[in-house]
Image: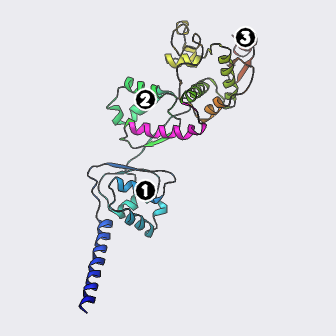
Amino acid sequence: MDTLIKIITALTIAILALLGYVYFSIFVPADVGGYPVIVEVVQGENLSSISDKLYLQKIIKNKFIFENFAKVAKQDSRIQIGEYTFKKPLNVIEIVDKLANARYEYIPVIITITEGEDSRSIADKLLSNFKNINSIYTRDELLAILQAKEGYLFPETYNYAPFATLEDVFKKIDEEFVKRTSSNNLSPNDLRRIITIASILEKEVPHPEDMKIVAGIINNRLKADMPLQMDSTLGYYTGKASLELTTEDLQSDSPYNTYKVKGLPSGPIGNPGDISIQAALNPDINEYVYFLSDKEGINHYAKTYAEHLRNRKTYLNK
């Protein structure tokens, strides 16, 4: 009888201890130590992966209890994607409610990089939207960093916390670039060549359906050892629009002056999107070596310089 009592007592103590631990794990917040803490829930992420992130950041004490509470509360399928800011300790009930109801606790900063956009305007966007960037970098400093990544800042809409750092900004952009280009299986040199051509297409070709044709023209001129003679490459260097370029600009020794320097410019002149990259990868096979855009943005092509001159007179009155 004494043995049975001891067993029952031990079991009771064990159950009470377990209940106490469960209660403590659910109702008493974990102590992260430093706030704010950001946890991002991404598209397609499952509950186990989310609980791993919360546990590693010390926001929850026990992954098993968190996951099962979410399931019992029928909130596991309601968890919303996005960046969550934890400004203070929360218990499991509060955390599940936060995730299921998208309580991000900040208004996210939305940054959109458009197809063909270059680092000058991207620098202005970052400086005007992020205090952690504006307080550290001058415009010239930031521009130099961005220009080193020119062509690899993939055009997309990005969602950030307002206190994101430059490293945070680059992390998402770099991941997007890899996701969108890795399937092409190009070497770094070949990828840079394709990105450079695509960046020229973004500036030179108003209509996407013409990009493969112009990509073919670029390849034809390169094969023929002809200078590309693209206003866009020189405009990237000078910061000027085509109509603003001067005779002096055309004589500059810049590696972006494709009127004087044969071959591609020394790097991309903007950040191309999917369509232009695919055009650069799959250029049209043609015999054209000249093209121009008329006042309506319609392209006209020529196989000879004489034909090109006729197009200039006909469509541009030059």
Question: Which residue is labeled 3 in the image?
Answer: 305
Q: Are marks 1 and 3 in contact (CB under 8 Å)?
A: no
Residue at 52%, 53% (x, y): give it: 44
Q: Quadrant of residue 92?
A: bottom left
Residue 66 in view of the camera? yes
Observer-side mark, 1 or 3, equals 1
Q: Which residues are magenta?
A: 167-187
Mark 2 secondary-structure assignment: helix
Question: Which residue is labeled 1 in the image?
Answer: 50
- Magenta stretch, overall SS: helix
**Residue 306 picture location, percent across and down:** 75, 9
Question: Can you say which quadrant of the picture contains the C terminus?
Answer: top right
180 vs 29, left or right, is right
Task: Residue 124: give its label.
Answer: 2
Report the residue that reaches farthest toward the bottom: 1
226 vs 125, left or right, is right
The answer to if 297 sits in the magenta stretch is no
The kind of residue tagged 2 is Asp
- Seen in the picture, residue 55 relative to 4 is either above or below; the reply is above
Judge by depth and name the residue closer to the eye, 34 or 63.
Answer: 63
The kind of residue tagged 1 is Ile
Mark pair 1, 3: CA separation: 62 Å
Judge by depth and name the residue closer to the eye, 9 or 283.
Answer: 9
Q: Are marks 1 and 2 in contact (CB under 8 Å)?
A: no
